[in-house]
Amino acid sequence: MDYYLLKWIHILSSTILFGTGVGSAFYMFMANRSRDLPAMYFAVRHVVIADWLFTAPAVIVQFLSGIGLLYTTGYGLSNIWLVWGIVPYFCAGACWLPVVWLQIRMRDLVKSALDNNTDVPLSYWLFDRWWILLGSLAFPMIVVVFYLMVFKPD
């Protein structure tokens, strides 16, 4: 595959990955702070959908296009910037996987509260804290990956 096409795919998928993550996090965080159950349900339901439609495919495309770029450019694990870019990428992914589970549980809990005309259980707010913590850990890791991929410091 042509280097520039592969690079464009890699940049585009990173933009989708980062943009979807930041946008989803913002809207779900703000909806949860409102404590308005219909708004919370709308946000979390669509965040779960966005993860399946945009985030998960972007993660896969990032990985595959990254491997393609390594092959095309000749970079390897002897380049320390690359190793330091791969580590936070996978650490951010390790944060994202439980976040997906949390979001699905949160969606189901808020839906049940709406259906039963009750408030969300306390477990929802515990999940919210974990969701914030894991997202707060993943965000700077992705920023570091962006830095390393652009500047490639030795």
Image (cartoon, rainbow, N blue to C red):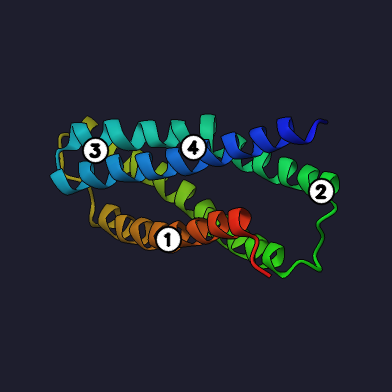
Which quadrant does the N terminus fall into? Answer: top right
Disc 3 marks a residue whose amino acid type is: Met
Within 10 Å of disc 3 (Cα), the crowding (few <14, some 14-19, many 20+) is: many
Q: Disc 1 to disc 2, how far (Cα)?
A: 33 Å
Pointer 1 residue? 134
Viewer-nearest of labels 3 and 1? 1
Distance between mark 2 and mark 4 Cα atoms? 30 Å
Give the mark, 1 or 2, whose residue is nearer the N terminus: 2
Q: Which badge, 3 or 4, is on the more N-terminal residue?
A: 3
* Mark identifier at residue 51: 4
Q: Which circle's residue, 2 or 4, is located before the other in the chain?
A: 4
Q: Quadrant of residue 23?
A: top left
| Cβ atoms at labels 4 and 1 below 8 Å apart | no
Residue 39 is left or right of residue 57, and the answer is left
Q: Nearer the viewer, mark 2 or mark 3?
A: 2
Residue nearest the viewer, comparing 75 with 33 = 75
**Percent x, y of residue 47:** 39, 36
Image position, residue 34 (x, y; %): 14, 44
What residue sits right under mark 2 in the picture?
73
